[in-house]
Amino acid sequence: MQRRNFLRLSATSAMAVAVAPSLITQKLYAEDGSLFQTFEKVQLKDAQGNPMKAAALAQEENYIFFYPYAGTPALAVNLATPTQKEVKLKAEDGTEYVYKGGVGAKGTIVAYSAICPHQLTYPQASMSMFQYVGEKGKTLAYDKGGVFVCTSHLSAFEPKQGGKVVGGPASQGLASIVLEIDAEDTLWAVGVLGPVKFQDFFDAFKKELKEVYGRNGAKELVKTETKVQPLKNFTAEIIQS
């Protein structure tokens, strides 16, 4: 398996240890500033229930899936160009962490939490005001395409730099969903890197989430598998700006 996004832990003896994300079982704030949280190891599957192949991801298409909880959306994109590697980032509280880069043969496959850290805008079945805009696309949120955009308040995030905020009122970047690709070229989600807004999200949209998932259903951890589909198939309207 590819394990591109790993966490370095610095022991009190100053020895560094590399740990595969699917082997870590708790939230860790390492001495080197890394921030990582593991969840269930989940296989991404297409609408027909078949394992999602990395090679099957169309370039620059928005793919939505739910992870690590049943109600928390994420977007996966096969970018047109590779991401940067070893990108140093900082959370709103000053915590530093390192994004290792995209996965896949060309290092172009990324996934991020689709909850905007500004005011928690997220894709819904009725409409989506959060999406990736292709490199040749245009957006009022940034001076060029190739970014994730929240059209609610025009925040922009750079997927090739670990979800770094590059425009708008958001004060921190997107949390990335850590992906692995196995020997059969199938995709797995294994954890989350960076600051998360999950509890804030659950609190803010308690009523809406209850209508969709039932009482506390949105907070259930996704286990074993999660459905992946193009965002345009999931939502009735994608709001672009």
Image (cartoon, rainbow, N blue to C red):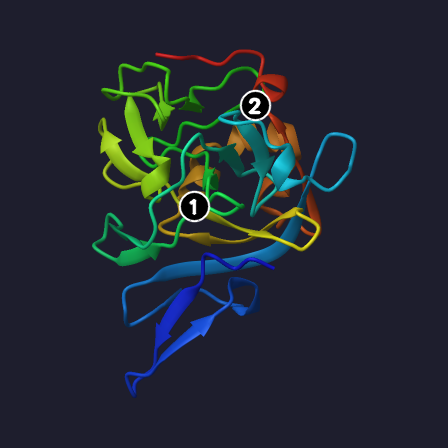
The image shows residue 67 at horizontal and vertical percentages of: 57, 44
Q: Quadrant of the N terminus?
A: bottom right
Q: Quadrant of the C terminus?
A: top left
**Depth check, front residue: 24 or 216:** 24
The residue carrying mark 2 is: 231
Q: Which mark is residue 176?
A: 1
Image spot of residue 52 (x, y percent): 68, 39
Residue pictured at 62% horizontal, 56% vertical:
41
Q: Residue 47 got which mark?
A: none
Rendered view: 169 above or below 160: above
Instruction: Estimate the x, y position of residue 167 in percent, counting from the top left.
Output: 23, 28
147 horizontally vs 42: left or right: left
Q: Residues within 10 Å of mark 1 (few under 14, many from 20)?
A: many
- Give the class, few, some or many, for how many residues have Cα within 10 Å of label 2's Cα (few <14, many ≥20): many
Calculate the distance from the C-alpha at mark 2 to the C-alpha at mark 1.
Answer: 18 Å
**Amino acid type at image mark 2:** Leu
> Within the image, what quadrant is residue 235 found in?
top right
